[in-house]
Image: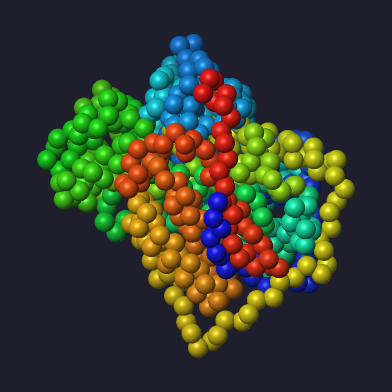
Amino acid sequence: MNSPALELSRYLTAFQARRLALYRFDVVVLGTGAAGATAALAAARGGASVALIAKDQIAETNTNYAQGGVAAVLSPDDSLESHRADTLALGCGLCEPEVVERVISGGPGAIERLRSLGAEFDSDARGRLELSREGGHSHARIVHAHGAATGVEIQRTLSRAVAAHPEIATFERCFAIDLLSANEHGREQANISGVLCQTQRGEMVVFGADQVILATGGGGQLYRETTNPTIATGDGVAMAFRAGARLRDLEFFQFHPTCLYIAGAARVLISEIVRGEGGILRDRSGARFMTEYHPSAELAPRDVVSRACVDRMVKTGDTNVYLDLSELDRDPHRLFPGISRICRYFKIDIAKDPIPVRPGAHYMVGGVRVDAEGRSDIDGLWAVGECASTGLHGANRMGSNSLLEGLVLGEVAGRLAARDAKRSSSRSIESELSFARTTPPTDIRLSIEDMTYSLKSLMWRQMGIVRAQAGIEDAISKLEFWTRAVSALAPADNKSWELVNMLTLARLASESALMRVESRGVHFRTDHPTTDPAWRVHTNLAAQDEGGVIRSLALEREPIAESALAL
């Protein structure tokens, strides 16, 4: 297909490898959420020495903000076949059957491992796990903790286990800048040899390892409205792209329909589990509207509910819609104590007052293209969790399948990375490896904050819940210009590197969205509103490096395994 022009440096900042401190490990894991912590523990159990790198504090992850729970087949009324069928149906034809099978069948074991580490999930008086239902699921199979605080419990459990393991060294507030390759002049044969990082003291160091696992989460901060924490800037996907890894399906970004909307306040997710318990969406006049958009009403797939909310906001001239919990059979304050506490701060009594909500960017479905075991197409580079594109979610993630994926495939990737580290001879960091960067002019000042806000606003308007060719093309043009400006003028610091990563990911997602001329799952184009069978393919893209500068972008289609239809 076509090759759009790019102008992007292979590395974000200048460095000379021989001048940097080198810390050697068997496996380096970037990211400390469910996927990363699980991978680190599995690698350590496999006998590997592990460096676990946290961008912020170890508990500041997307996992910690997850509310709903983990989807797993644990009831005699449920079945693995049913969970697989639900996942495939919501994936709109783009799920990979081998991955669906591996992840779904690994659910019960993942829950048991967490419980063996001390995780406490909500149970009834007899000690049986309470299971809830979310949109797209045909059965109640969502394991949760403290109502809607599942992520906090999982993160607490895994962080404690990581801290107790003697083979895991954790480095907090350490910014991963770029992946280092052992063979820079033969990209087809290039191997990962480590990670260039900046420590919390501002020192640039190298973590050398033959096996690097990306578990860096998503890129919700690309959007003005998001449920993601501030660290979710797509760093892992951007650095993998610069290193030559193929990316897949970046046009698919899921928006959660119900974020607490208070002007000027941070957006807070109101979990889908609330609608699963009977919460009703109403417009400003009090009318229930989801019955007009889908037979499953409030439990329709998230993309349907999000578009319905936006449509009703436009029709009523309101900035939000409302979530009504007044008709729940049980006390919502006891069911959802965390949500109750937050709403009470804004003088909202969730038992009687409607909660103002609107959609927000929630989950990056696409990412680094990996196989069913988490391997990318670069030797020694793995990706798990939200930064990976495994093929589990297809074109639309089903609620609570994401934590499941991270827990199951994190275990697989960590174990296999430890095995591969034992089998391989240690790759040395080339002492002559270096990158020179032109010093930005001192008389031109660039506002990183203003540029970041402009990016987030642009993506919300033109690459948000609905898109069209003209808006996508305009976004690409602006993103190209802004990337050149930031790369040339911004200072060499974390905020600038974050912004380049965000601009890179935004540009790549826009190119993928322009490429897919149909609507499927969470990708909805008003100029192509129907699903086209000819586009039952993945979209792949990769950098084309010319002497340390990425000059163009290779775009291609990847067929889906035909057995996905019969699974």
Q: Give the colouring mode of the picture.
A: rainbow
Residue 528, by quadrant, is top left
Q: Nearer the viewer, residue 213 or 6?
A: 6
In the drawing, does residue 475 fall left or right of residue 99?
A: left
**Is any atom of residue 349 visible in this view?**
no
Residue 15 lies, in percent from the top left, at: 71, 71
Residue at the (62%, 57%) spot, across then down: 543
Q: Nearer the viewer, residue 358 or 146?
A: 358
In the drawing, does residue 327 fall left or right of residue 46?
A: left
Residue 257 lies, in percent from the top left, at: 33, 41
Q: Residue furthest top?
A: 76
In the drawing, does residue 65 fall left or right of residue 430?
A: left
Q: Residue furthest bottom?
A: 443
User: Dividing the image into 4 quarters, which one contains the C terminus?
Assistant: top right
Residue at the (49%, 42%) spot, across then down: 365
Residue 235, by quadrant, is bottom right
**Is any atom of residue 441 visible in this view?**
yes
Residue at the (38%, 41%) spot, across then down: 519
Q: Nearer the viewer, residue 293 or 219?
A: 293
Residue 530 lies, in percent from the top left, at: 35, 38
